[in-house]
Image (cartoon, rainbow, N blue to C red):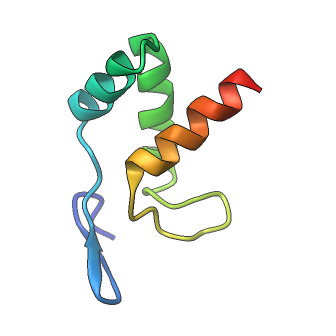
Amino acid sequence: MNDVQLSFGFGQINPPTLDEVKTFFTAKAVPVAEAEVFYYYYQSLDWHSESGMPIHNWKEAAEDWLYNLEN
C-alpha cells in the first residue's frame, strides 16, 4: 500500500506530516516528543487503528491519544 495516500470507499486517507502533528500537539501544550511518538506509532500501523480500521481523522485520533495520556 502507498503510505502517502490510501483509498478507502468514498474518501481518501491523507496522513498528516510530522510537522502538522507537531504543530497540533504544540497548540495543545504537549511536548514535541509526544507528537513524534504519536506520529511514528500510527505511521507504523499505516494510519489504521489497532483494530485495523483506517484513520480518516487524525486529529480525532490525536485527541484520543492526549485524553489517554491524562487518564
Q: Name the image quarter holding the C terminus.
A: top right
Where, by quadrant of the figure, is residue 21 drawn?
top left
Is residue 4 found left or right of 41 in the rendered image? left
For this orientation, the residue located farthest to the right is 71
| Residue 55 image-quadrant placement | bottom left
**Compared with residue 65, is residue 57 higher up or lower down, i.e. above or below?**
below
Q: Residue at x 42, y 12 (%)?
A: 29
Viewer-closest of 23 and 42: 23
Q: Position of residue 32 (x, y in %)?
A: 39, 13
Q: Position of residue 56 (x, y in %)?
A: 39, 65
Which image quarter is the N terminus in? bottom left
> Which residue is painted at 27% across and 45% down in the image?
16
Residue 46 located left or right of residue 5: right
- Image coordinates of residue 15 in percent, x first then y, are 29, 53
What count of labels does the image hold?
0
Apparent side of residue 24 relative to residue 34 in the rendered image (left or right): left
Q: Is 44 above or below relative to 23?
A: below
Would residue 10 appear left or right of 56 to someone viewing this image?
left
Vertical arrangement, residue 66 with respect to residue 29, above or below: below
Q: Say which residue appears at 58% left-offset and 59% top-offset.
A: 49
Of residues 15 and 60, the one nearer the viewer is 60
- Judging depth in this view, the residue of 50 and 44 nearest the camera is 50
